[in-house]
Image (cartoon, rainbow, N blue to C red):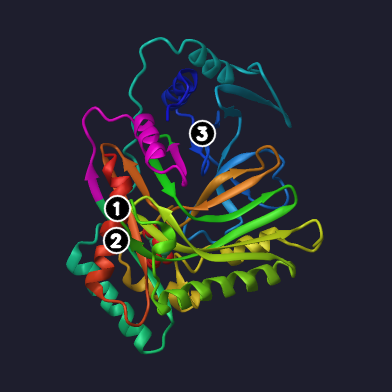
């Protein structure tokens, strides 16, 4: 899966001019889309006032308000091989100012030699957790569950991988998109700070044509490529864990004023070498005028699939015990208000690129009878697809 030459050239030029951008391929999609901001990243409400102009949201796990996100404002929008340029509230096919013009010229001269796209080295590097420390973290989590502190907690860790001397972030994005046809695959480039390369299987919230949808995702097994999803068996404890995530989503819909919704599943879905258990929820928001999407987003983020249950005590446990900053990992990302639709995904199966190093972030849900060695292995399995492209 290749980026059109003119778009690759436009994105490389954006990086050279220190313009933030995000480029992504939707689940099952064949084309890349992108937004480029001609200024710095901004802060925007995802739902509510001030969202007339599209942007790409990148929000942190620990964002104080889930509805207020870091934003790459769409001064230039890319779909397929076409670029459109913002003029007030609308988009034109020709550039309208100097910054847009610089990108348009780079796209037009795409036959010229292209610099490799690299990440800045300015971001703070995450503390890594080795095998012994991670097993100990899991043991502390199961002990807290045994003491009745919470039912489930999602622990995680970061792991560094050196990048090849001749690496190129756009080539890595193309490689990841080819490996993960059913995932939301994205590269978010933040000048100076680094970049995030993501291939996530989990939708957080989508809104289009007056319909809102989300998923309850839980449980992980590593399956051979040729095992059909329908042949995977799930232990009762994972079926129960996934059902708990589903009940949380039902309550979040109710809190957002959405009382009627369709629910499908659970069924087994594949994400490269892994399978998960997933249910889908969808509601008509035109029939629910009181539906408050900002309330729904605040209830859903962080989801119990990345935090635990109940959320408050699981969160306190993580702050005290996890021992590193998750940053944008287990936050959310995706296009907001683009062609009238918003599609947010949980930032999983993700790597933060800082200079010449990729930091992989991986985690897993811990319940009362979880075993530290199995949980460590689950995180190793989760590094495999993103890790294989480096
Ligand atoms: C926290 C992660 O996975 C979550 C999403 C799906 C299944 C999960 C699990 O089986 O534990 C986790 O809740 C991760 O991949 O880093």
Instruction: Measure the alpha-carbon separation of dots 1 and 3.
Output: 25 Å
- Count the numbered circles shown: 3
x, y percent for residue 341: 67, 44
- Across and down, in percent, residue 332 comes to 51, 53
Q: Is mark 2 within 8 Å of ligand 1?
A: yes
Q: Secondary structure at mark 3?
A: loop
Horizontal side of 387 relative to 242 (left or right) equals: left
Q: What is the x, y in percent for residue 385?
A: 32, 47
Q: Secondary structure at mark 2?
A: helix
Circle on res. 379: 2
Compared across the picture, whether 333 is left or right of 148 comes to right
In the image, 235 versus 325, the foreground residue is 235
- Is residue 167 shown in magenta? yes
Vertical relation: 274 (above or below) 320: above
Q: Which residue is mark 3?
A: 30
Marks 1 & 3, CB-CB < 8 Å contact: no
State the image quarter where residue 3 is shown.
top left
Q: Nearer the viewer, residue 387 or 99?
A: 387
Q: Quadrant of ligand 1?
A: bottom left
Is ligand 1 within 8 Å of the beta carbon of the residue shown at mark 3? no
- Residues at circles 1 and 2 in contact by the CB criterion of under 8 Å: yes
Query: Where is the N terminus found, in terms of image quarters?
Result: top left
**Numbered label attached to residue 143:** none
Quarter of the image where one finds residue 147: bottom left
Residue wearing tag 1 = 383
**Which residue range is magenta in the image?**
160-189
Badge 1: residue crowd in 10 Å (few <14, some 14–19, many ≥20): many
Closer to the N terminus: mark 2 or mark 3?
A: 3
Judge from the rendering whether residue 367 lies leftward or rightward of residue 186; answer left or right.
left
């Amino acid at each position: 899966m290749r980026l059109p030459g003119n778009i690759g050239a436009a994105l490389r030029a954006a990086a050279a001019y220190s313009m933030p951008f995000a480029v992504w391929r939707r689940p099952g999609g064949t084309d890349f889309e992108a937004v480029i901001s001609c200024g710095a990243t901004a802060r925007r409400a995802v739902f509510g006032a001030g969202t007339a102009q599209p942007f790409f949201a990148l929000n942190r796990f620990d964002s104080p308000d889930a509805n207020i996100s870091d934003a790459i404002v769409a001064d230039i929008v890319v779909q397929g091989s076409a670029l459109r340029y913002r003029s007030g509230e609308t988009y034109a096919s020709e550039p309208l100012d100097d910054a847009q013009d610089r990108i348009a010229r780079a796209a037009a001269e795409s036959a010229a030699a292209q610099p490799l796209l690299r990440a800045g080295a300015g971001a703070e590097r995450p503390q890594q957790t080795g095998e012994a420390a991670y097993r100990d973290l899991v043991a502390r989590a199961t002990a807290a569950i045994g003491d009745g502190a919470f039912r489930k907690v999602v622990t995680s860790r970061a792991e560094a991988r050196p990048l090849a001397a001749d690496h190129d972030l756009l080539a890595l994005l193309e490689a990841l998109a080819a490996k993960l046809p059913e995932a939301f695959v994205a590269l978010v480039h933040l000048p100076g700070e680094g970049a995030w390369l993501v291939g996530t299987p989990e939708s957080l919230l989508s809104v289009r044509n007056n319909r809102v949808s989300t998923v309850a995702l839980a449980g992980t097994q590593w399956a051979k490529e040729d095992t059909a999803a329908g042949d995977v068996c799930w232990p009762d404890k994972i079926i129960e864990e996934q059902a708990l995530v589903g009940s949380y989503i039902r309550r979040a819909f109710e809190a957002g004023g959405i009382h009627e919704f369709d629910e499908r599943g659970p069924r087994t879905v594949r994400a490269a070498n892994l399978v998960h258990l997933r249910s889908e929820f969808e509601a008509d928001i035109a029939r629910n005028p009181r539906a408050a999407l900002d309330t729904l987003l605040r209830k859903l983020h962080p989801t119990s699939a990345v935090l635990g249950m109940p959320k408050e005590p699981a969160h306190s446990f993580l702050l005290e015990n996890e021992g590193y900053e998750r940053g944008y990992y287990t936050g959310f990302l995706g296009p907001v208000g683009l062609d009238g639709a918003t599609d947010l995904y949980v930032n999983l199966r993700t790597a933060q690129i800082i200079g010449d190093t990729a930091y992989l972030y991986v985690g897993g849900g811990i319940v009362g009878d979880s075993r530290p060695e199995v949980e460590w292995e689950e995180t190793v399995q989760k590094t495999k697809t993103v890790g294989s492209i480096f």
